[in-house]
């Protein structure tokens, strides 16, 4: 046994057969993902084979990421709970609202991790529009402390 493999439990790599090698290279090629930004509709966003290289599904995926990004900002800067509400119900609602916002934020983050330039742009534009709506359209200061949830910190 090789002395450098003491943490491997004595397992040595087996030489690949030609049938496994061909299948392995095909699997390796299919499982590769971009590690730099690229442009184009041939990408997987959130789910395997979605949007699947179809232009209409790619546009739908971009709209989906855009809407999620807007909602992340809207949930961060909107007051749903009225002053004087039941503290237990308000606390439960804040907790559920927080979980929903964090879930949406993680979905936007995972979408961006597709490294597709279009997805990145619509995510940033969605966050920007959400910020614009909540701070300027409703004449609220971005530093107002009257929101239900604390701002997301990156």
Image: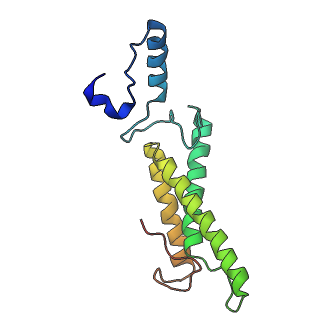
Q: Is residue 48 left or right of residue 88?
A: left
How many tags in the picture?
Answer: 0
**Residue drawn at x 46%, y 18% as measured from the top left:** 24
The part of the image, by quadrant, that contains residue 70 is bottom right
Q: Is residue 84 above or below residue 8?
A: below
Q: Quadrant of the C terminus?
A: bottom left
Q: In which quarter of the image is the N terminus?
A: top left
Percent across and percent down for residue 10 are 38, 26
**Residue drawn at x 56%, y 63% as measured from the top left:** 102
Q: In this view, does 144 lie above or below 128?
A: below
Percent across and percent down for residue 109 are 49, 53
Q: Nearer the viewer, residue 88 or 85?
A: 88
Percent across and percent down for residue 94 are 64, 75
**Residue drawn at x 66%, y 69% as measured from the top left:** 96
**Residue drawn at x 40%, y 30% as measured from the top left:** 9
Image color mode = rainbow
Q: Is residue 86 left or right of residue 97?
A: right
As drawn, which residue projects farthest toward the left? 3
Q: Nearer the viewer, residue 53 or 115?
A: 115
As drawn, which residue projects farthest toward the top? 18
Percent across and percent down for residue 38 are 40, 38
Q: Which of 97 and 71 is in front in this view?
A: 97
The part of the image, by quadrant, that contains residue 81 is bottom right
């Amino acid at each position: 046994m090789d002395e450098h493999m003491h943490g491997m439990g004595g397992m040595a790599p087996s030489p690949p057969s030609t049938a496994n090698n061909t299948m392995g290279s095909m699997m390796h090629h299919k499982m590769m993902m971009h590690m730099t930004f690229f442009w184009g509709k041939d990408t997987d966003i959130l789910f395997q084979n979605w949007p699947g290289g179809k232009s209409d599904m790619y546009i739908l995926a971009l709209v989906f990421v855009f809407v999620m990004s807007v909602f992340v900002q809207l949930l961060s800067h909107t007051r749903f709970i009225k002053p004087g509400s039941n503290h237990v119900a308000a606390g439960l609602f804040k907790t559920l609202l927080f979980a929903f916002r964090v879930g949406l934020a993680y979905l936007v983050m995972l979408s961006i991790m597709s490294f597709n330039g279009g997805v990145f742009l619509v995510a940033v534009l969605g966050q920007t529009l959400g910020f614009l709506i909540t701070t300027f359209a409703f004449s609220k200061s971005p530093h107002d402390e009257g929101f239900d949830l604390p701002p997301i910190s990156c």
